[in-house]
């Protein structure tokens, strides 16, 4: 029964996230916001909504381990699973903005999260405000860099002519689906953890993290098969930054997130830091600015090892 709640919860999160993205973009067009700003801010925030709702619901319902490992596990899955499988399908070219801005910022956010958690075993509203404020600063830098390079994000123009009534209905469907999806997913995860005799943190870092990464994985693989640059390395790195800055930042502003499972700081967060750090040698050795199929295989094997040790413990 717990697996059924998890599957239903994930399905609702996918549906709710899609409707929220559509309504947010359509509303942004109504407010005369440029396509570039919509693509780099509105869409990014909207796609983080499922993770935000799951973490917030988990923190408020007394399961901080799920709130933390939902993000930590998702960041690991984005690199090990999504990037790895996408590279297996088709090698990925890496642009210079990766090591000039995106990667250093991701590492700063990851290290800041590690410091805040190890300092006092919790993420306080002040620390959450620092993370969220830093995310806003990063977005401002990103927008300035995009204007110089004249990057136009791929945003659906058809959403510019959507009626106000349809936008309202989409928002309503998205909000309801996200709410019930997050509740069912967290409840199902708790039940599954109890049934398997493992901690909430393990389920959050594996089952929930993989589940919330499925939409990104599907989009990445389809894009790779079609030889489209629909999902770049920059998008995945950006997603990891958003997970820490917006999901954990906003959740901890609303309620302090305490570390209740020792494995989060003794194991899981080091896996997240390792997967983030290994990207630099991967894009440098031996063929520069390229993540080839065998590098993708290394990432997938690494992710498999993470799952093995998570359940073995």
Image (cartoon, rainbow, N blue to C red):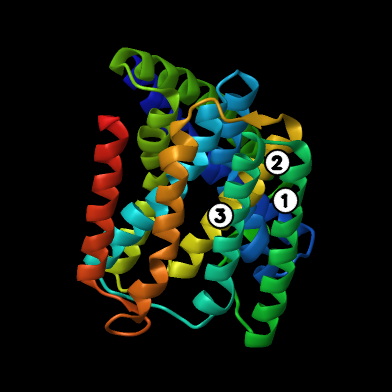
Do residues under tags 2 and 1 come within 8 Å of each other at their CB atoms? yes
Q: Name the residue under label 1.
A: 132
Q: How crowded is mark 3: few (under 14 residues within 10 Å), some or many (20 or more)?
A: many
Q: What element carries label 3?
A: helix
136 shown above or below 201: below
Nearer the viewer's eye, disc 1 or disc 3? 3
Q: Which residue is drawn at 54% across and 25% down?
A: 260
127 shown above or below 62: below
CA gap between label 2 and label 1 equals: 7 Å
301 vs 164, nearest the viewer: 301
Q: Residues within 10 Å of mark 2 (few under 14, many from 20)?
A: some
4 shown above or below 133: above
Q: Is residue 135 left or right of residue 277?
A: right
Q: Position of residue 88 (x, y in %)?
A: 22, 65
Q: Residue at x 61, y 18 (%)?
A: 61
Q: How crowded is mark 1: few (under 14 residues within 10 Å), some or many (20 or more)?
A: many
N-term-proximal mark, 2 vs 3: 3
Nearer the viewer's eye, disc 2 or disc 3? 3
Q: How many labels does the image show?
A: 3
Assign the N terminus to one quadrant of the image. Answer: top left
- Per the rendering, the mark at residue 250 is 2
In this orientation, does residue 237 appear?
yes
242 vs 49, nearest the viewer: 242
Q: Name the residue under label 3.
A: 110
In this orientation, does residue 21 appear?
no
CA gap between label 2 and label 3 equals: 16 Å
Q: What element carries label 1?
A: helix
- Per the rendering, the mark at residue 96 is none
């Amino acid at each position: 029964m717990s697996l059924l709640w998890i599957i239903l919860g994930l399905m609702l999160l996918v549906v709710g996230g899609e409707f929220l993205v559509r309504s947010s973009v359509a509303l942004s067009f109504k407010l005369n916001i440029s396509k570039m700003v919509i693509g780099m801010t509105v869409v990014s925030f909207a796609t983080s909504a499922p993770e935000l709702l799951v973490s917030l619901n988990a923190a408020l319902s007394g399961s901080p381990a799920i709130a933390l490992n939902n993000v930590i596990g998702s960041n690991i899955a984005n690199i090990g699973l999504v990037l790895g499988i996408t590279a297996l399908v088709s090698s990925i070219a890496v642009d210079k903005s990766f090591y000039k801005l995106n990667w250093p910022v991701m590492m700063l956010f990851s290290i800041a999260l590690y410091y805040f958690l190890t300092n006092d075993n919790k993420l306080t509203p002040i620390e959450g405000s620092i993370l969220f404020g830093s995310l806003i600063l990063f977005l401002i830098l990103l927008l300035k860099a995009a204007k110089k390079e004249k990057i136009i994000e791929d945003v659906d123009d058809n959403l510019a002519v959507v009626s106000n009534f349809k936008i309202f209905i989409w928002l309503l469907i998205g909000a309801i689906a996200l709410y019930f999806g997050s509740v069912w997913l967290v409840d199902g995860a708790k039940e599954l953890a109890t049934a398997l005799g493992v901690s909430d943190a393990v389920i959050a870092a594996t089952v929930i993290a993989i589940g919330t990464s499925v939409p990104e994985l599907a989009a990445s693989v389809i894009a790779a098969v079609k030889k489209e640059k629909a999902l770049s390395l920059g998008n995945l790195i950006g997603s990891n930054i958003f997970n820490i800055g917006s999901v954990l930042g906003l959740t901890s502003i609303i309620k302090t997130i305490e570390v209740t499972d020792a494995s989060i700081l003794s194991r899981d967060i080091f896996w997240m830091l390792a997967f983030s750090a290994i990207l630099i040698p991967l894009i440098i050795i031996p063929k520069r600015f390229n993540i080839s199929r065998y590098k993708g295989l290394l990432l997938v094997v690494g992710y498999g090892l993470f799952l093995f040790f998570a359940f073995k413990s």
